[in-house]
Amino acid sequence: MTRHARCASRLAVAALGLTFAGCGADAKDTGPKAPPLPPLQLRPMVPELQAILDAWPQPDEATQRELRDYADVALQLVEADPRTAGRATQDLLENPAAWFVLEPALFHEQLAVRQRAAWLIGQSKQTVLQLPLLLRLKYEPEPEVLVWIADAVQQLGNDTGLIWLDVLITGRPSARESTSPALYTLQNCEQSRRDAIVQQAGTMAIAALQARSVEVPATPSWDDLHRLLTEKGKAWQERGVSDLPDVPAPAPEQLEWRIAAQLLTTQSPQLRPIDDARWILNRLGVPGVPMLVRALVADERYLRTMPLQVLAELGHSAAAAAPAVLPLLADPLTQSYAVRALGEIGATEALPHLRPMLTDRDTELRCASAQAVGLLGDESSRAELQRLMNDQNEVMDVRVDAAFGLLCLGPAAAARAFLDERATKKDYHDAMLTQLEERLAER
């Protein structure tokens, strides 16, 4: 999300389609002029998404009863001989409506049932079920279950699961993956319990890496596993696709229905459903991009804003979205989100449109474009970034983002000293500085 709310006067004038001044420093539009943008053509999207949601069929009553019978046996809620249990499990996993019973089982009060449900979903190869698993990563309270959820996620071709296995092994969650209450439990439980969970995560990690043709040492150390999982995690975040072979694509109709449900949370007055939707979509990778692109033409403001935020989080794995994002540079309500998204996804073709925004009247656009041109490696913007950073009449947000942009272009002693000075003087947000430094370290 951006760091500043837009001014009410900016919104009012934008609604009239007039030229306006933004909040912040008295910058002037004195730079190069941008070429024409593709036309911005918005349409109502909420009814379209709601129609998708309403059209999704529930299993008929007979199928529901059959699925519950299979699930009782497969989840080991009722006793059955091995032959009956095996047959019921196989029939459940082969049923395309298995989600009807397996998803609720992820929330069962019994730990063992949640473990078994996660394992069954991983075995099902119904890759669309990674969406409920991704959300369960956020809320699962028990690390013994979390490890099975992470493993199921990776088995369905989403390498977010590898990142979480690494978190369980190292006990060092990143800022991005630190929400699950199970991680707090793990950090504060007795040593023997922690050791058992770490051992289980390590065993699963070795199998997951080998399934991706990664050469794992015969007796890998924990550092070996951390290094290999980190490499795969970075590759996933860069590409949004896994090296796991023979993973079927998510069922198109189910995927469309599930993502439509997440996008519609933007119409909710409650924050948690929206946060949950972003959590899922930020970790879904390439499969989610087509529906995000589809929502960019929504004339409902928040419905086109969330996809821009998610595309920025997905980074280069969402590069295919660039043509759909470009027209939104003409939308005063979401253009700063569009600028950030274009920078994060690596859309170098947008640079002729972004360079002029370095001198835009609007503070937020100057901030967003300073980061974007740096992320896109635009050497021709170096001089303007230096000017912005050194301008003591410029707002600090813009100066900091200009320094970040310069450091993205390569070693820049003055920019490095500028950010270090902010940290020393404590005259800028610590959390934001930390986030920028983490981004620079990743590069």
Image (tube, grey):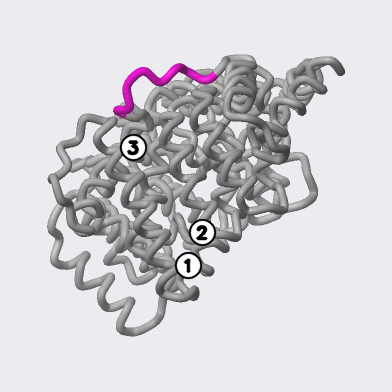
Q: Which residue is mark 1?
A: 186
Q: Which residue type carries mark 2? A: Pro
What's the CA distance linking mark 1 and mark 2?
6 Å
What's the CA distance linking mark 3 and mark 1?
25 Å
Quick check: 71 left or right of 156? Answer: right
Q: Are marks 1 and 2 in contact (CB under 8 Å)?
A: yes
Q: Residue extending furthest right?
A: 61
Is residue 398 visible in the rendered image? The answer is no
- Which residue is painted at 15% across and 52% down in the image? 410
Q: Which residue is mark 2?
A: 143
Q: Which residue type carries mark 1? A: Leu
- Work out whether 421 lies above or below 93: below
The span picked out in magenta is 243-250
Q: Circle 1 sits in a helix, a strand or a loop, which is it? A: helix
Q: Which residue is mark 3?
A: 236
Q: Nearer the viewer, mark 3 or mark 2?
A: 2
Residue 78 percent across, percent down from the top left: 72, 38
- Work out whether 124 lies above or below 410: above
